[in-house]
Amino acid sequence: MNKTADEQLLLKAKDQVVQCDRCGTCLTVCPLFAFRDTERVSARGKNAITRALAEGGLRPTDEMLSAVDFCLLCQACVDSCPNKVRTDEAMIDVRQYLTDKAGGVGIKYKLLGGVMKRKALVKMGAAALAAARALRLGKLVPFGMAPEEFTRAKFLEAFAGPAALGRPAAPGSAVPSPAAKVAYFRGCGMEMMFPAAAAATRDILGTTTALIVRDNPCCGMPHLAHGLRGDFLALAKENIDLFADVDIIVTDCGSCGGTLKRFGAYLAADPAWRDKAAAFSGKVMDLTEYLAKVGYQPRAKVDVPVTWHDPCHLVRGQGIRQQPRELLKATGKFVELKEADRCCGGAGSFHIDYPDAAAQVLARKQANIEKTGAAIVVSGCPSCLVQLAKAAAASGGKFKAMHISQVI
Amino acid sequence: MINAEVKKKFRAIVGDEYALDSDLDRFGYSYDSSFVPLVPANNPDMVVRPLTTEQVAAVMAIADEHGIPVTPRGAASGRTGGSVPLMGGISLSLDRMTNILELDEKNMMVTAEAGVRTIDLYNHCAAKNLFFPPDPASWKMSTIGGNVAENAGGMRAVKYGVTGDYVMGLQVVLADGTVVNTGGKAVKNVTGYDLTSLFVGSEGTLGIVTRALFKLIPMPKTRGTIRLMFGSLDAGCETVNRLLQENIVPAAAEIMDKTSLDAVARKRSAAFDPAVESCVILETDGEDQAALDAQAKRIAAVARECGVLEFQVAQSQAESDELWAIRRTMSSAVAALAPNRIGEDISVPRSAFPEVVKRIKAISEKHGLTIAVFGHAGDGNLHPSILCDLNNPEEAERAHHAADDIFAAALAVGGTLSGEHGIGITKKPYIYKALGEAGVKLMQSVKQSLDPKGILNPGKIW
Ligand SMILES: Cc1cc2nc3c(=O)[nH]c(=O)nc-3n(C[C@H](O)[C@H](O)[C@H](O)COP(=O)(O)OP(=O)(O)OC[C@H]3O[C@@H](n4cnc5c(N)ncnc54)[C@H](O)[C@@H]3O)c2cc1C
């Protein structure tokens, strides 16, 4: 990225953060500030750093990069902010700026970028996992948990009673527009860590439409969040072309959805891509959003209490709050979770970079889940599910964590 | 600069984790919510975050010994630069002192540490049906230490008064580390000087407040919210004034002009009738719904005589929360209208409210700058906000002249510089005009006797 593009990025971030009034409302909602309460951790602190950087009052340093990196991008601050300052976007821009300036993304992420970009990865190749392991990203792919706990059969066996076992998925009651071409977006996290859940999503979608599944590349969120904007844009363009001929693109990952829906915004300044990108983003739907639209009825009833954890990128990123709850209510005994929309600490790869902080954020989530008495906490984002599965284990089996496709 | 030896002593008192001196951490404690620019930064040399009164006292003793400036800080939501460490030294952050020590239901009093957030204290008391009335719009984040130090007001000041009206006693650490306790639970108390009042509103320049004892009142049984729209700001002011004269005292009476309304509309994608020039939001409270309905009826009658365009009683808690959210976010929404906002806090006799607003509009035209006006119509305290770009030197010049004119207008109608935000840094230039030489001198002599070395929040007020 050349210098002027860099400066533009910083100006863009500045445009956001000058809207910050430094009132401090965000201090009261930030999940990280809740236990590490120094100013630089807060959104106000990060906005001030950004503004001072743009106004020449602070020099870029490693300390600064680590400060802007220590953010869940969960948007709780944005939500509570009187001026709706997009601190999350500003942080992404500043990370990029500092990365380019200092020439140093965590080298880890440069490599990760390369891996995620390879189409092979989303095919869930063992080779990709091996590659990830070679990069010491092993923790990103928690082998221990995926195979067993996250299969639909296991779920039914555990919760739905014998009658439900082995019964084929009933035909969906949805009435999709017959002409609409519906595609499934294969998310890296889902395919790598929760292949059974991804398969369940496809089964469900298959009951509503003649589902199109392609070898799409990564949505680019990990790249964007870690200073690999060039890679992100390349991936976006590849995806836009790949799905040019479909009408609806469904994703079962909140983070992918939040990102895909913003391609239009990210490419708005590029005349060659602007319109195509906007059209693409207009077609993207979260699984629950789509199922609500087509009037999907869950396949089986379960009579254990279930609760829902809102993924940040679903609830604040896309404004989806009701749809998953309605689906769960139709499935079984839904109980509301206190602070359901508070970040669980997964936050993409945050939990890998800052395991201790993520654990603290998670502890609060776990306590809230236990208070509901739910046997299953359901969510819609692989990064959350990794965290929630950890919480489930820590709770000593009080509850399990499942993707929504495996429950409805 | 604080030398390494002394820094070590501070670390030993509060623990390494709570004595910060990295560049970025020092920067984080260099600003507050005022328009004092971020750059060049007023960094402290060290941020010290004590947990107990004993730690505060130990820190002060060392600061006193070495003549190190100490600037107390709560949540840095202050609007006048009060917690900005102008002379470096220590930023003494009290935000870890968050214990509510005692809720004395019999005497209806509560004791809390300085770092407790205002809203947490309110909720703690509300759970026992007791009411802590001072409610600055910043109550979600502001600390009670900051509230006491600024004698913060709030929406409900018109009926219930300001922070100072509820302070019964304080624990204060003096400049040399001495701990004093003022006041107490006795309702009547004239034993010696009223030192409690001396510290209320002293902006951290006379001592560090570590604890406060507040009196409480029973929680009103029901509350209602009414929104009134007017074709002029005058009509809104007139209505509020008439209500008070007729002894219909709303718990809150907030007014905002069209510019302020538009600012909120922009952030909340709401739209208002173009004929609307001002909006008044009232809170009513009373024994039961019938009492509220009766009040609403009387208010409606007065408002009609003043030409109200819309009169809307909130029908649910959600509706009334929404109306108050509009008011609470107003200040920040207005700030976002321009690169910079010079927010003022003048306070005038209630009867002069329409007159001073008229003068502000004239000032706005004279200098060619938009000035949004909103405030507490019930008590004559208003917040004119000059919208400008301080990076443009010519505009900055005009903005500062406009600010000068606003203060002059406030004084001319018998008002004063600040109703609730304090003087801090931003209103220093006007202090002599407001208080006179003799007034400032007397304050300086009080300061001199409590803080002879001038280490407490130096560079503020005058
Ligand atoms: C959006 C918004 C709305 C606001 N609305 C109102 C309002 O309606 N009414 C109102 O009155 N104010 C309002 N304010 C101003 C501000 O919130 C108040 O002045 C508040 O009391 C400051 O509290 P704080 O904890 O943030 O103090 P800070 O800003 O940290 O400090 C304020 C001053 O108090 C001193 N101080 C802080 N703690 C102590 C202590 N323990 N001992 C001694 N000195 C101390 C500091 O040195 C400084 O001089 C608003 C501010 C914002 C951002």
Image (tube, coloured by chain):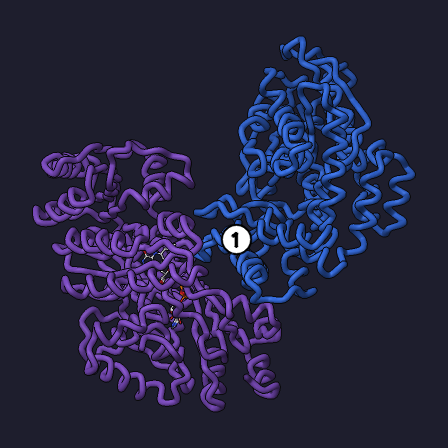
**In the image, residue B273 above or below residue B256:** above
Q: Which residue sits at x=32%, y=55%?
A: B385
Task: Please indicate whether residue A171 sits to the left or right of residue B63 in the image.
Answer: right
Task: Please indicate whether residue B119 sits to the left or right of residue A280 in the image.
Answer: left
Dividing the picture into quadrants, the one containing residue B303 is top left
**In the image, residue A40 above or below residue A365:** below
Q: Would you name the residue on which mark 1 appears?
A: A17
Task: Give residue A221's position: percent from left, percent from top.
Answer: 70, 41
Dividing the picture into quadrants, the one containing residue A10 is bottom right
Kindly tell me whether residue A285 is visible in this rendering. Answer: no
Kindly tell me whether residue A277 is visible in this rendering. Answer: yes
Q: In what quadrant does ligand 1 lie?
A: bottom left
In the image, A167 versus B320, the foreground residue is B320
Task: Give residue B393's position: percent from left, percent from top.
Answer: 42, 63
Task: Give residue B99's position: percent from left, percent from top.
Answer: 44, 64
Q: Chain of mark 1?
A: A
Q: Which residue sits at x=30%, y=59%?
A: B105
10 Å crowding of disc 1: few (<14), some (14-19), many (20+): many
In the image, B369 versus A205, the foreground residue is B369
In the image, A298 versus A109, the foreground residue is A109
Q: Which residue sits at x=62%, y=22%?
A: A290
Amino acid tagged 1: Val
For chain B, give the colour: purple
